[in-house]
Amino acid sequence: MGNYKVEVLIENKPKLRDPEGETIHKELLLKGGYNMVKEVRTGKMIRIVLEAENGLEAENLVRKLCDELRIYNPLVSSLRIKLVEAS
Amino acid sequence: METLRLKLSLTDEEIRKLSEMLGREPNTLELLMVDAEWSEHCSYKSSKPLLKGFLTEGERVILGPGYDAGVLDLGNSYILTIHIESHNHPSAIDPYGGAATGIGGVVRDILSMGTRPIALLDVLRFGRIDKSNHSKWLFKNVIKGIADYGNCIGVPTIAGEIEFDECFERNCLVDVVCLGLGKRENLTLSLAQDEGDSIILVGGRTGRDGIKGASFASKTLADEEDRSVVQIPDPFTKKLLIEATLEAVATGRVKGLKDLGGGGLSCALSEVADKGNSGLIINLDKIPLREEDMNEIEIMLSESQERMLFVVEKGYEYEIGKIFEKYGLNFSVIGKVCKDGYLNLKNKERLVSRIPVKILANAPIIYRESKEPPLKEFENIEKPSLDLDWNKVLKRLLSNPSIASKAWVYEQYDHEVGVRTVIKPGFSDASVLRIPHGKFIAVKADGNSKHCNLDPYNGSAGILSEACRNVICVGAEPMAFVDHMQFGDPGNPEVFWYFSQAVKGMADYSKHLNIPCVGGKVSFYNEDEVTKKAIKPSPIACVIGLIEREEQIKRIEANYNDSIFLLGITKDEMGGSEYYEFIHNLVGGLCPKVNFEFDKTLFKALKEAIKKDLVKSLHDLSKGGLAIALAELCIFNNRGIKVNLDSLPRKTNRVDEILFSESHSRFLIIPRKGRIKELKNLFEEKGIPFVRIGKVYGEELDIFFQGRNLIKLGLDDLLKPYHESIPKIMGDLE
């Protein structure tokens, strides 16, 4: 058993709009002169430290808890889970 | 073709009729447009004949049902607009986005009359949050969706109503009412009349979201595949759209306005042409798209949010376009008004569809079969034992989420933005808003699914009566109402019977009391996708009242030694009561009946009493009956009450019925000091029962009846269950 740090990234599914990202893009970045910016997407990041047998189990556990406890709505958002640290 | 047909809501008979009317076979695009337009959601094909029973005209009514919103005359050239919408199915699968886009939709309806949205109300129905995690998840996210969206666009949520019942476990109801304020000269209708006027599409780009949404709402919630219909709310664009629209309307060059909601462009275009008895030529290649490879069907049926259709006087496109440009909104002249009565759709000069707008916008009426369910057997049930600790019962009822404080909900809303709110949610029976020229409006929405389940006629009439009583409680005179009828599958004869009875009950009441209906919605196919059971019938009424002078505004005020009177008669009417259903899990008994004639006399008398300033405070008796109303009086004022119910006007002697019956048309009244005699005379002359039952006294609620001290509870014992119930259930309080 060890401690693992896992990051969860929740964002709107790629085909769905992200009005917050669009607003930052249009109202802040383009108006601020950063014309090279082509797209902005926002999301929510959750960092979880948990105890698990190994990295894979840590990731699976995090996916399970996100699904079970409805931390995101699978119909609207996509979930990316990434192991960032093992100790 | 076969797979397409499976996806349609249209019946084979309707497809046959369509071909007959067209004199040819429709192409796929046309079939899908008609599918959306002829859905229950857009066409009211099952409900139209029944809805004609409502009173729709009145002294203050400028426009009744049939437009994007009802319009009322406030005097001094000001108008008030009101509309109700639901977003039940989208909220059941995506509570956050579904509820938010529900507000987005109703706000656009108000905007499309050329008026500024000034307030929102929401009427919500969920499963038992005290028992189900799924309902808790829906509840939490619907509230968050409403709060985030409403707060972002700067429109306060000023009132609402929430009920919890197992039947809403997987089919929650999310109704939103929006009020708008404007000048009469800026009133804009949703029609395209004059040849040559330009059709301009403004706001969000057209994308693939929500495609088939209108037909989706007209089917029961089904499989996973249907779930690509979620719509993404965009309050940032909405705020710009509100300001740009109002600025454009003020130029006087906008001749028609229509919001894009269910059925997308297809519905909006055919409806403006139908109302204006005109035709349209639309160039699909001029529509700003979010994704390049969208086909004609997707373009016409997309339900992308935050779009408005403008009919602009020929020659002023540039001037109006400048306004949209200033706000950074996308816009495009997509076509023009013609006179041929057809919706002509072109794609790069190629005609892809030409269909008469009258056919598209007017679905053939369906006359549904109706069959009365065996409700009589529910009337004679064995009444529960009277050997109970009434203190415990009252505490449990106060913690019932349908009765307990909803502060957890409305504290998430910004209810004061716009500085119009005079009485905030949770402090009175209705909310009060300031309007120009020193006047005020009161507004309240009500529903009671449990009553309607046992007796849809009286339950539905009772809802309108209760909403009227609630606005009277703050000193207003009921002016008009909007309704929303929510039921299961209308193809089920018993469901349709419920629907027709509920419409009839509310319509009869509206005619008898002379309170016009200025708009409404019908939502069918609300049923549980697992149990296949329809929701309990859920009509809703939202009443608007007018208060002419500030001094007439009433609050629930009680000071020490104030006398407390009860107005009205308490009867054995426990059917659908919170006491039977929440405490005993008992469905049955006699549903409360409204006496139309009594209400008429009563409302007149109350109007006079308020005008003459004979009344200090009024509180309506509703869910939980007399005991809950007394407890609320204690809770709102943080003072005790001592009452003796021996002389209570009643037609029952059972303790439970006296305490918890939900008989209609009863009020707790605190008369103005020194005016008691006058008030008594006023009611007595009109034969209205009105007796003193006690006074504001001490630090506890003390209820005596025939020598027994039925209830004796300290303020803390009342406050705790009432205030802590919902926060505890939601895990915000240990």
Image: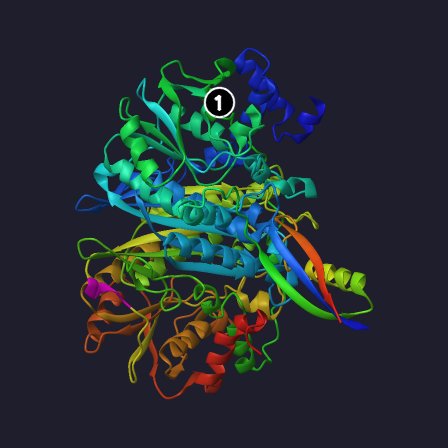
Residue B39 sits above or below residue B495 on the image: above
Residue hosting label 1: B285
Residue B179 sits above or below residue B291 on the image: below
Residue B352: x and y in percent read 53, 16
**Residue at image point 58% right, 72% down:** B731
**Residue at image point 54% right, 43% down:** A17
Between B377 and B667, the residue placed more toward the observer is B667
**Magenta-span inclusion, residue B551:** yes
**Quadrant of the rendered structure where residue A82 is?**
bottom right
Which corner quadrant holds the C terminus of chain B? bottom right
Residue A47: x and y in percent read 64, 65
Between A7 and B538, the residue placed more toward the observer is A7
Say which amino acid is labelled 1: Asp
Residue B686: x and y in percent read 26, 62
Give the extent of the magenta segment: B550-554
**Magenta-span inclusion, residue B280:** no
Any part of residue B165 in sight: yes
Crowdedness of circle 1 by 10 Å Cα count: few (<14), some, many (20+)? some
Q: Considering the numbered disc 1 on the image, is that residue within a helix, a strand or a loop?
A: helix
**Residue at image point 34% right, 23% down:** B198
Residue B315 sits above or below residue B562 on the image: above
Between B553 and B230, the residue placed more toward the observer is B230
**Residue at image point 38% right, 47% down:** B239
Subunit ID for the residue under disc 1: B
